Amino acid sequence: MRGANILFNFVTLVFVILTLGVIAYAVAVAGDMAEPPFLAPPTDVPTPTLIPDLGTPLPTPFLPTFTPSTTPEPTGTPEPTLTGEATVQPAVEPTRTPARLPEVTATPQPLAPLPTQPPPEGGGDGQADGTESDAVGSAARAALPHFTPTAVSPAVAAARVTARPSATPTITLTPGPRPTSTVTSTPQGPAPPTLAPYPFIVQPGTPLLRESFAQGTTGCAWQGLAGTVVDQRGEAVVGVEVRVRGDASGERVVLAGTGTDYGPSGWEVRLGGGPSAERVTVTLWSGDRLLSPTVEVTFPAACAQNLALINFIQTRTF
């Protein structure tokens, strides 16, 4: 046990000495006192040199500058819309008629002869001279022309005032025709189908007169009617009344589904024991409601046509 401890202590001492040596060498490399043995940068890379001075300054690159500008958005100016046509009559230049002045008629008066007086004898005094001057003035005033105005009646003056035209132009607006809207009705989908008057119709190709073939009806000793009642899919419709009325045999009533020799919804009505010329009508009923049109059959009294085959097809519910 003591030998193992000595061995471990020796190994520990070796690693401590190696560690101190590595630390000392790292410090020497960091202080440029020793060169690193590995991980040194390659020395064959040329050292970059500066660009020689050519004596000419290098051009300064041009960097464009952008000055933002505000572009106004276009604005729409609504145009006026006219709802009606307007007719503008041009202004008429009024004709001015000068008003008439009252007519003045000048009537000349004849000159009165100047009075002649003999001169006073032996001279005269101032009074006599004054009297003579007054007489001369009165005669001169009387010789002047007189103007007599002609009066205008009030009706003529009012007519002249009324006849003066107005200087205000008149504009007459004539409205145009108003727009008219025509409403066209659009059908909403297809038109509903027209229902048949009866829920059952007679199958095309029937009634068919032929020789009877069911069991118990073969031969010439039988005459009657038979058929089937089905829906649009060909399935049997049972329980419907089949009413047969003959001119000689009277009325017979059977239900669809009782004559299985003709099918699941077959029916059969025996009229007699041999062929005879007889007219017969056949209809379908449900209680008191008629379900089919009336079918008329006339037998020709022949053994080869002693069976009238009539089939009914349902077209709608009832």
Image (cartoon, grey):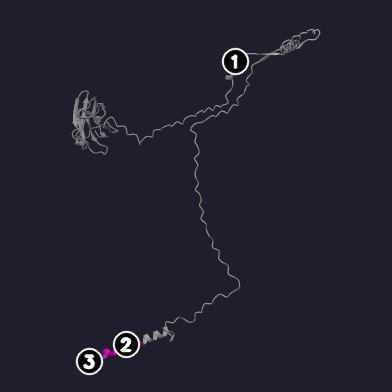
Q: Label 3: which residue?
A: 2
3D distance between C-alphas at marks 1 and 2? 153 Å
Whether residue 160 is visible here, answered yes or no, is yes
Tags 1 and 2 touching, CB below 8 Å? no
Quick check: is 128 in the magenta stretch?
no
Residue 2 picture location, percent across and down: 22, 92
- The answer to which of 300 and 195 lies nearer the viewer is 195
Query: Element type at marker 2?
Result: helix
Residue identified by numbered label 2: 16
Q: In the image, is residue 65 above or below residue 234?
A: below
Determine whether, in the image, residue 285 is placed left or right of residue 163: left
Write down the quadrant of residue 149 in the picture.
top right
**Residue 99: image x %, image y %?**
62, 20
Please provide the residue range marked out in magenta: 7-20
Look at label 3 and name its amino acid: Arg
Q: Separation of disc 2 and disc 3 at Cα?
A: 21 Å
Mark 3, other Cα within 10 Å: few <14 / some 14–19 / many ≥20: few
Give the spatial CA distance, label 1 vs label 3: 169 Å
Q: Which mark is residue 156?
A: 1
- For the residues bearing labels 2 and 3, Cβ distance under 8 angstroms: no
Badge nearest the viewer, 2 or 3: 2
Q: Which residue is drawn at 36% across and 87% down?
A: 21
The residue type indicated by label 1 comes to Val
Quick check: is 19 in the magenta stretch? yes
In which quadrant is the C terminus drawn? top left
Does label 1 or label 3 sit earlier along the sequence? 3
Main SS of residues in magenta:
helix
